Image (tube, helix red, strand yellow):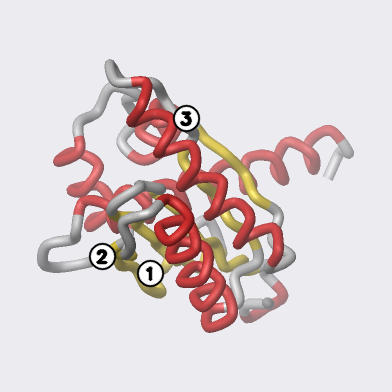
Amino acid sequence: MQAEAGAAMSRILGIDPGSRITGYGLIEFSRDKPRYVASGTIRVEGKALDEKLRCIYSQLTELIQLYRPDAMAIEQVFVHRNPDSALKLGQARGAAICAGAMGGLPVAEYTPSEIKQSVVGSGRADKSQVQYMIRALLSLTGTLQVDASDALAVAICHAHRRHLERRLANAVQGG
């Protein structure tokens, strides 16, 4: 995708994986500024693991076909107190990553603290601080679902990281 005056624009799909609810957020990033495109949640259907993973995979595949993002970013697993929950989250992430990979997207992964640092400025920010900054950065009004807000934060983190990498590459090349 190209923005006016030749400035590169990218469309990024952010994913906040979950075994019951998976959040997604889509932004366009151009001229150092993110723009909201869409967000929401996938309510994971089914009781058996294979049904749940198929639901995540198929619904993300549909979103990828509908919105045609250039890249996908996803939150990395962090182990809570419950290893079983971490395993289920890892399986949901795997289904989401496969949907992105099969859609031909490069997939980047970020830790929760990297995402919070990128959006709020503190890796220890709480969910309400993330939601507030997402609304401010994207000029949104109203309430965002937590999972959708987290997914938008993942997308913004990836946009900032790619922008910084391009600036560093240009500086190294002397341009």
Q: Earlier in the sequence, mark 2 or mark 1?
A: 1
Indicate the position of residue 126 as horizontal and vertical percent values.
Answer: 20, 31
Residue type, label 3: Thr
What is the distance, in whole Å, between disc 2 and disc 3 at their CAs? 25 Å
Residue at 56%, 71% in the rendered image: 61
Give the residue at x 60% y 62%. 99
Residue 100: x, y in percent?
62, 60
Residue designated by label 1:
36
The N terminus: image quadrant: bottom right
User: Are discs 2 and 1 less than 8 Å apart at CB?
Assistant: yes
Which one is nearer the viewer's eye here, 134 or 90? 90
For badge 1, the amino acid type reads Tyr
> Which is nearer the N-term, disc 3 or disc 1?
1
SS label for mark 1: strand
Q: Nearer the viewer, mark 3 or mark 1?
A: 3
Residue that numbered label 2 is attached to: 139
Name the element at disc 3.
loop
**Residue 173 point in image, percent of width and height:** 88, 38
Q: Are marks 2 and 3 in contact (CB under 8 Å)?
A: no
Q: Earlier in the sequence, mark 2 or mark 3?
A: 3
Q: Is residue 111 left or right of residue 164?
A: left
- Closer to us: 44 or 62: 44
Residue at which label 3 appears: 111
Kindly identify the residue that appears in the image at 63 percent across and 81 percent down: 4
Q: Is residue 144 left or right of residue 101?
A: left
In this view, the mark in front (2 or 3): 3
**Answer yes or no: do the residues labelled 3 and 1 have beta carbons within 8 Å?**
no
Marks 3/1: CA–CA distance:
22 Å
In front: 8, or 93? 93
Left-right relation of 102 to 135: right
